[in-house]
Structures are given as structure tokens and as C-alpha cells.
Amino acid sequence: MYLTTEKKKEIFEKFGTLVTNTGSSEGQIALLTQRIKHMTEHLKKHRKDFHTQKSLINLVGKRRKLLKYIKNFDINRYRIIIKELNLRK
């Protein structure tokens, strides 16, 4: 797979609360963002891969739901994660 265990730990160290807390919303959003970037690059090469396209749409929806949860729960955490991941312009 494109994302190794070490890379995942690095993502959770940077964005999550703890390395072992893989369920934190910030860590999940960061992991989903990496997967979305990978799938986007794949779709640039393989335009007719509709299975990947459907999966990409599902991942974007999951990330949007998690971002909405953080926004309603704590607006400061939302602003920090948006800024660090460069999700909004």
C-alpha cells in the first residue's frame, strides 16, 4: 500500500492528540486528506477509473462530516486543522 505504518504514525503524531489515539478527529481528517491526494493523482493518470472516482467522492464526504463535527464542537481546532492541511483558500 502507498501509506506505510511509519507514515501513519507520523501523521497521527503531527495532527492527532497521541500516537496511539488513532480515533481522534484531527488524525482521521489528516489521514483522509492523504488518501484523497493519492486518489486524485491516480485519477489524473487514469481518467476512466470510475471505481476510484466513486471511492474518492465517499472519502471527501467522510472528511466533510468530520470537519463539520469539529466545527460544531470546537471552532478553534477547526481553524487550526484547516490552516495546517491547506483545505480552504
Image (cartoon, rainbow, N blue to C red):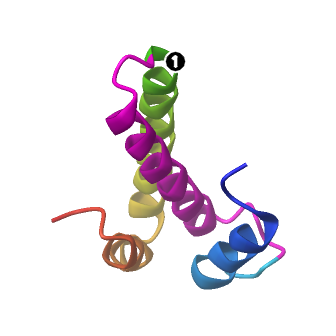
Magenta stretch: dominant secondary structure: helix
Where, by quadrant of the figure, is residue 76 drawn? Answer: bottom left
Residue 68 image point, x, y percent: 40, 51
Q: Residue placed at 46% from the left, 44% from the top?
A: 65
Q: Nearer the viewer, residue 68 or 58?
A: 58
**Magenta-colored stretch includes residue 82:** no
| Label 1 neighbour load within 10 Å: few <14, some 14-19, many 20+ | few
Residue tagged 1: 51
> Residue pushed farthest front?
45
User: Where are the magenta residues, as a range?
Assistant: 20-49
Q: Tell me the quadrant of the picture where the C terminus can be found.
A: bottom left
Which residue lies at the image location 68% right of the left edge and 79% below the top edge? Answer: 10
Q: Is residue 26 left or right of residue 85?
A: right
Under mark 1, the amino acid is His
Residue 5: horizontal and vertical position, in percent? 80, 66
Image coordinates of residue 51 in percent, x first then y, are: 52, 18
- Estimate the x, y position of residue 78 in percent, counting from the top left: 39, 70
Q: Residue at x 47, y 56 (%)?
A: 33
- Local secondary structure at mark 1: helix
